[in-house]
Image: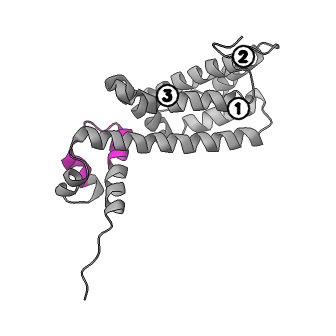
Amino acid sequence: MTPATRDPSARREQIVAAAAELLSSGDGKLTHRRVAEHAGVPLGSTTYYFASLDDLVAAALQALAERVEADLAESAELLAASDGTPESVARLFHDYLTDGDRVRTEIALYLAAVTRPELAPLSHRWFTGLVDVLATLTDRRTATVMAVFVDGACMHAALQDEPLDLSLVEDLTRSLMLSAPTAPVPEEGKP
């Protein structure tokens, strides 16, 4: 019999996935020990692949940011397939807000940006990506205001353990979309 070969890349990904799950669950502070237990690997594996806890947290946050980008791509597809009315956009927002994993992931990225400014670009991906997606329906300024609304609604959903009522999300989305200027608004810094 030959000894089992280990896949270092898979082990590292397993550790990163466990750390990302712990971060997005909001389940307290990460330690190498907690991550190893959650990943089902020996403690030495976490310290072998990640010399510092900061390196492990950064890798986990990168994984969360990649998950957010996949969510944004899916949202863009759903939005493109919708009729683009405020009601259909509001339903997409509401569906997002009822997905606890997505909400917790966004909050974890924002918390990391607040406590570790060097990681802020990871959390900016969500916001700028959402603005880009929404700008396919309306002007960029309105898309930005809508993204701010979704951010606040995410925070509300995380703190209240439930999203805003669909009818309220529809009312707010309708108000924002219908108040969009009819003439194109130039992008910031452009005439």
* Residue at the far bottom in the pictured view: 1
Asked if the residue under mark 2 is in contact with the one under mark 3, i.e. CB atoms within 8 Å, the reply is: no
Looking at the image, is mark 3 or mark 2 earlier in the sequence?
3
Q: How far across and how far down the image is residue 135, in percent?
A: 70, 27
Q: Element type at marker 3?
A: helix
Q: Residue at x 44, y 33 (%)?
A: 122
Residue nearer the viewer, 154 or 7: 7
Q: Give the range drawn in magenta.
A: 19-37
Residue 54 as seen in the image, left or right of residue 43: right
Looking at the image, is mark 1 or mark 3 earlier in the sequence?
1
Residue 175's mark?
A: 2
Q: How far across and how far down the image is residue 13, in percent?
A: 36, 55
Q: Element type at marker 1?
A: helix
Report the magenta stretch's main SS.
helix
Residue 24 magenta: yes
Residue nearer the viewer, 179 or 76: 76
Residue nearer the viewer, 76 or 125: 125
Q: Which amino acid does label 2 sit on?
A: Ser
The answer to whether residue 188 is seen in the rendering is yes
Q: Is residue 129 above or below residue 190?
A: below
Q: Which amino acid does label 1 sit on?
A: Val
Q: Element type at marker 2?
A: helix
Residue 58, located in which quarter of the rendered image?
Answer: top left
- Camera-near label (3 vs 2) is 3
Give the spatial CA distance, label 2 vs label 1.
12 Å
Asked if the residue under mark 3 is in contact with the one under mark 1, i.e. CB atoms within 8 Å, the reply is: no
Give the spatial CA distance, label 1 vs label 3.
22 Å
